[in-house]
Amino acid sequence: RRNYIEGLFLSSGVMKSPDHTMMLLVDVLRELRVRHRFNGYIHMKCIPGASQELVRQAGFLADRLSVNIEIPSETSLKRLAPEKDHQSVYLPMRHIREGVQQYHEERGRFRNAPQFAPAGQSTQLIVGASAERDRDILLLSSSLYKGPELRRVYYSGFVPVNAYDSRLPVGKPVPLVRENRLYQADWLMRFYHFEAEEILDAAQPDLDLEVDPKIAWALRHPEFFPVDVNRDDYAVILRVPGIGIKSAQRIVAARRYRTLTAEHLRRIGVVMGRAKYFLADLSGLRELHEQRTALEGQTNGAAYAQGAAGAGGMAQAHGAAANSKAAQGRGGLAGAASGVPVGLGGLGGAAGSGYSGEAGALADALDLPVARQAVPAQLPRLRQPAMLGRKYLTIQEAGPEYVRRALLGSKRKRAPVQEQYSLFA
């Protein structure tokens, strides 16, 4: 039915010969496009060893073509499938690449040049059927991505279905988390500008199944951190765990107008539960808090002095009644008269937040000369007390093992903390 489905995947096992099977697949494509006028997405799997002409016909009818490499190394492929070789796989992949390149050249001269595999090509690798390590798989994927026409490499874990063939590994299926880690590493290579040699090396040939590849790389390279999101380049910020592509772009755009804090990063979309261990101190809140404390002390001191003078002049007139009412408030008139620092709600704290309670009513009634002064607006008020508490240590301060345990959420030995004014409380 027309518009009943939006896309389909077309594949087949080899019947008689690669060319015969490929010809049947092309006929099905033509039937769908011409007779049934199906204009949805079609992903077709090309048969290894098929001729160039059949691959070209398929490219003009399908949106994406794929040729599965399956086994990463030629040696393992020969052991598992002696009748196959990588040459028969790479040849149709080269035909697809040439067809895409030719289409781009023709499109530059003719606007209505017919499209050839507009969604590019992809391939698939089987994980766990042979002895290749994750590093070998990623190195192969990295070399394939250097060709501009390959859009995606898919990874499929090997699942044993029989035990009679001694060439196949016997045991449990490949854990799904390994597939997931390979896809995450693949994403780092495609969008985060990581090289395969950076993600895994000879000393670490397999991906860590407990943490994702980006965190694993960060734990192995503590010298790269901490990163200052207000100063470092986009490529450096992109390597911080918890910061994605969109978040890094927003950081670079937003820091042009103001200095970013952890609260800003949360609003941008940064996962601070991960990023906080790899970021430099964002706030400079120690200096800001000291400035605010000094300024509030000066302002409150002036208010206390005015309150003391006014209270001293009115104490004889109002006697014990005024003093008893002042004692009921927070801080109160008595505290103001004595010059003792009192609560923010009372008369002595009027400079910070205004009057409140019985002391506030009494102060209004007595018309004491205590102005409701405010701290200048250029010093933003801090959230109390969370931002002035303890700080999570960075990877350089506490070491990779501490950060790893913290990220995994396991029971760990309490690490030393630094008493600092920080947003990471």
Image: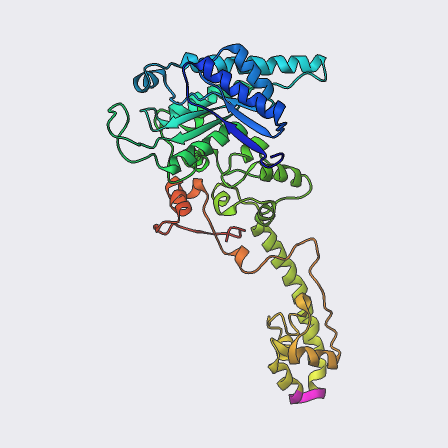
Residue 390's x, y, as percent? 47, 54
Image quadrant in which you'd find residue 151: top right
**Along the line of sight, which residue is nearer the eye, 61 or 245?**
61
Is 312 placed above or below 178 here? below
In this view of the protein, can residue 340 be seen by the observer? Answer: yes
Is 274 placed above or below 216 here? below
The magenta region covers 317-321
Is 412 placed above or below 134 here? below
Q: Which residue is pictured at 37% across the width and 52% down the height?
A: 414
Q: Which residue is pictured at 52% across the width and 24% down the height?
A: 44
Residue 86's x, y, as percent? 40, 14
**Along the line of sight, which residue is nearer the eye, 285 or 58?**
58
Residue 372's x, y, as percent? 72, 68
Question: Taken as a whole, is the magenta stretch helix, strand or loop?
Answer: helix
Residue 230's x, y, as percent? 60, 39
Look at the image and say whether residue 318 sits in the magenta stretch: yes
